[in-house]
Amino acid sequence: MPTNWSVEARIGPKVTVDPVQALAKFAAGQWGVVSRAELAACGLSDKQVKRMVARGHLHPLHRGVYAVGHRNVVTEGRFLAAVKACGPEAVSSHHAGCCLRGWLRYDGRPIDVTAPTKRTRPTIKTHRSELVERVIVRQIPTTPPLRTIIDLARVEEERTVKRALRAARFTEAELQLLPRTGLLGRILDLSAAPTASGNEDEVLDLVLKAGFTHPLVNARYPGSGYIPDLWWPEQCLLVEVDSLEWHSDPLAQRADLDRQAWLEAKGERVLRTTRAQVRRDPARFIARLRAAGAPLRGA
């Protein structure tokens, strides 16, 4: 077991302080979540644990896993509790592993855990694997990055896998280690560029499938803090994929106009679109790109 999960590494091999103090110190370092074995290592007997549960000092989350002090555990605590509930060799994986790294947003689904032995637990989706690799992400045992994305591709739809893969920003050397077959292969053959949202994913895919050369994606514009969504530097052409989340309020819209005026003064052309516009009339967007001089592959 990793040292950062060890009670002895936190409070010493022999507990000489009050068990409740030892518990508080240990739980503070792992999202307020502890297992029954960790409670025993802190010096708490079964009788004391039952009394703490009855008094509301411990709150059962899964069989043998508790939240300390209150039940309102943050998402990371829920993920760690799911891992603890599946045994000492268990790790967060698949969709949960992507969420821990910020590649995907957690949507409340059952938490993915991989372990040598598959266990049935409410709110946990377990995956059995004889080989369980682990790294620590946000204090939670998790499958390594490449293993996480490979596992995700086995169980999720293309849109979700593509979003996670592009958000991961793997190096070229890392991408070469991924399988070039199946769903991952199709995504890699198109592009693993570091887009920032699902909106950008759809527009980039349309651009590449229409035969245009691959633009720079989220590359910093020289001499500024501005990062265009898609950019062909030689053609002085940029594409911005607007969304309600980032471009709906008056201040954001004013900043967009000011930035566009600044870019146009430098000789750049800026095409703005939204995912809804591209979905509604993709041919029109492609025609706009051609008229603006976006370069075609092989031309």
Image: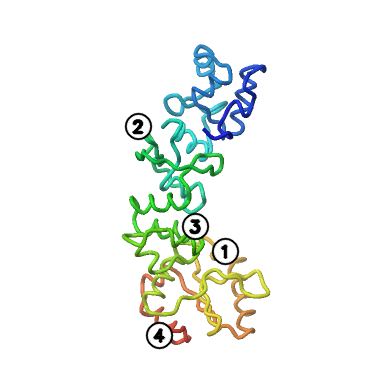
Q: Earlier in the sequence, mark 4 or mark 1?
A: 1
Residue 43's place in the image compared with 171, above or below, is above
Residue at which label 3 appears = 168
Residue at which label 2 appears = 119
Q: Earlier in the sequence, mark 4 or mark 3?
A: 3
Residue at which label 4 appears = 298
Residue 85's place in the image compared with 278, above or below, is above
Number of other residues with Cα within 10 Å of mark 1, as a class: few under 14, some 14 to 19, many 20 or more: few
Find out whether the residues at labels 4 and 1 contact each other: C-beta distance under 8 Å. no
Q: Which mark is residue 71?
A: none
At x 40% / y 85%, what residue is drawn? Answer: 298
Q: Which mark is residue 249?
A: 1
Which of the pair 238/133 is nearer the observer?
133
Q: Earlier in the sequence, mark 2 or mark 4?
A: 2
Residue 7 position, x and y percent, is 58, 27
Residue 292 position, x and y percent, is 48, 86
Mark-to-mark CA distance, 2 and 4: 54 Å
Find out whether the residues at labels 2 and 3 contact each other: C-beta distance under 8 Å. no
Mark-to-mark CA distance, 4 and 3: 30 Å
Mark-to-mark CA distance, 3 and 1: 29 Å
At x 43% / y 30%, what residue is drawn? Answer: 87
Number of other residues with Cα within 10 Å of mark 2, as a class: few under 14, some 14 to 19, many 20 or more: some
SS assignment at label 3: helix
